[in-house]
Image (cartoon, rainbow, N blue to C red):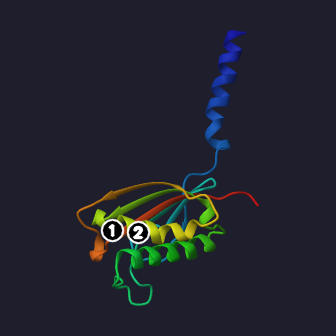
Amino acid sequence: MKRLVLILSLVAFAAQPALAQEGPRIAHQPSARIPFSAAVQVGNTYWLSGKLGANRETREMTEGRMGAETHNIMRAFGTLLEELGMDYGDLVRATVYVTDIDGYGEMNEAYAQYFEGIEPPSRVAMEVSGLVGGALIEISFIAVKTED
């Protein structure tokens, strides 16, 4: 009897990967020229790559800086979330990198506007020595798509 239970347990354990979802999949790829995915999906969880505050039309960092770059980033995430069938309310975790912690208040003021009336995601923020292209801020998110 013990042997039968052991065999059945091993069979069930071996079958588990076949029952699980396939591995990560690229949920959104904006360009073949960049070596990363904008969004990777596993189940109903999406890891959204960091975005910089470059102006969408000119690809330049916006003058006015920390607040303006934050708005550019958040609008870009709004577009991505919409394409994935989500919105800001589906965000559960944010990581914020700033090159000057003195701009934290300006970033926070702009960032907060996108979560008015909804619960904001958990967040970690840190100062770094530099970001790509001279950006002052980079933000990444994790989102969980809820069933409609």
x, y percent for residue 44: 63, 55
x, y percent for residue 135: 31, 74
Q: Which mark is residue 107?
A: 2
Identify which residue, 50 or 122, lies in the foreground. 122
User: At x 65% / y 43%, what residue is drawn?
Assistant: 18
Label 2 to label 1: alpha-carbon separation: 6 Å
**Which quadrant is home to the C terminus?**
bottom right
Identify which residue, 74 or 107, lies in the foreground. 107
In the shown orientation, is residue 69 left or right of residue 89? left
User: At x 52% / y 72%, what residue is drawn?
Assistant: 77
Residue 56 figure quarter: bottom left
> Are discs 2 and 1 less than 8 Å apart at CB?
yes
Q: Which residue is mark 1?
A: 103
Callout 2: helix, strand or loop?
A: helix
How many tags in the picture? 2
Against 119, residue 62 (above or below) is below
Identify which residue, 55 or 40, lies in the foreground. 55
User: At x 36% / y 64%, what residue is drawn?
Assistant: 104
Judged from this view, the residue extending furthest toward the top is 1
Report crowding for label 1: few under 14, some 14 to 19, many 20 or more residues within 10 A (C-alpha): some
Q: Is residue 33 visible?
A: no
Report crowding for label 2: few under 14, some 14 to 19, many 20 or more residues within 10 A (C-alpha): many
Against 116, residue 134 (above or below) is below
- Three-letter amino acid code of the residue under disc 2: Met
x, y percent for residue 87: 63, 68
Q: Is residue 47 visible?
A: yes
In the shown orientation, is residue 20 left or right of residue 96? right
